[in-house]
Amino acid sequence: MVKIVGIDYGAQTSGNTVIAHKEEHRVHLIQIPQKKHTDTWLQAQLLDLKSDVVYLDAPLSLPLAFSGLGDNFHYRKCDQLTKAMSPLFLGGLTARAMQLKHDLSSLIFHEVYPAFFQSERIGSLHYKNNMDLFLDDLHETHPFQLQHSPDNWHQVDALIALLIGQRHQQKKHREVGNPQEGIIII
């Protein structure tokens, strides 16, 4: 069986990176402690969990213009279609995500965008406003069992990343963007 994880990826020592994974039919949420080196911690966790496929909430590529194949140096097609921030605006986060994918080349990485998934698939007015009501809305459309309730929105976004990954594994997903440049799975 393929082991998938969803990750909400945060700044290097912010304590905002969260991994969501399923074990014994329950979703487990693991949040990095503050001031810990995120990328070192994350690599160790992914290997400890015996992960196969990672669904990461961070850009994993740059616009094609950087390869001489376009004229938009700010946005990829997937960013334009989802109204995501530019990978360049996210700068260091994008570079770290691309480095993580490179360093863990034995794993398969897919880019996800929980906020866009929420707006397109869930449509809850409670996203980033009322966690309990949002989780109720999310559970209605994408049932799940949690080991414990999320403590913050980073944990919720990691859960959404995992649910996107499950949809992808079941071939119920949609891909947004240009495959040569970068795809966001929703």
Image: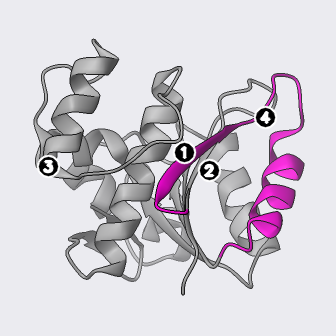
Give yes or no for residue 31 being in the magenta stretch. Answer: yes
Q: Nearer the viewer, residue 65 or 134?
A: 134
For the image, the number of numbered tags is 4
Indicate which disc residue 88 carries.
Answer: 1
Image position of 24 with respect to 135: above or below: below
| Contact between labelled residues 4 and 1, with CB atoms less than 8 Å apart | no
Where residue 131 sits in the image (x, y, percent)?
33, 19
Residue, disc 3? 141
Real-space Cα distance between discs 1 and 4?
A: 17 Å
| Contact between labelled residues 3 and 1, with CB atoms less than 8 Å apart | no
What is the secondary structure assignment of the residue under circle 4?
Answer: loop
Real-space Cα distance between discs 2 and 4?
A: 12 Å
Where residue 179 sits in the image (x, y, percent)?
35, 81
Real-space Cα distance between discs 1 and 3?
A: 33 Å
Residue, disc 4? 12
Question: Is residue 136 visible in the rendered structure shown here?
Answer: yes
Image position of 186 with respect to 103: above or below: above
Q: Residues within 10 Å of mark 4 (few under 14, many from 20)?
A: some
Which residue of the protein is positioned furthest toward the top in this rendering?
A: 129
Q: Nearer the viewer, mark 2 or mark 4?
A: 4
| Contact between labelled residues 3 and 4, with CB atoms less than 8 Å apart | no
**Colouring convention used in this rendered image of the protein:** one colour
Give yes or no for residue 58 being in the magenta stretch. Answer: no
Real-space Cα distance between discs 4 and 3?
A: 33 Å
User: Which residues make up the magenta segment?
Assistant: 24-51
Quadrant of the rendering where the C terminus is positioned: bottom left
Residue, disc 2? 94
Q: Is 6 on the left or on the right of 34, as rendered? A: left
- Looking at marks 2 and 1 on the same chain, the residue that comes earlier in the sequence is marked by 1
Quadrant of the rendering where the N terminus is positioned: bottom right
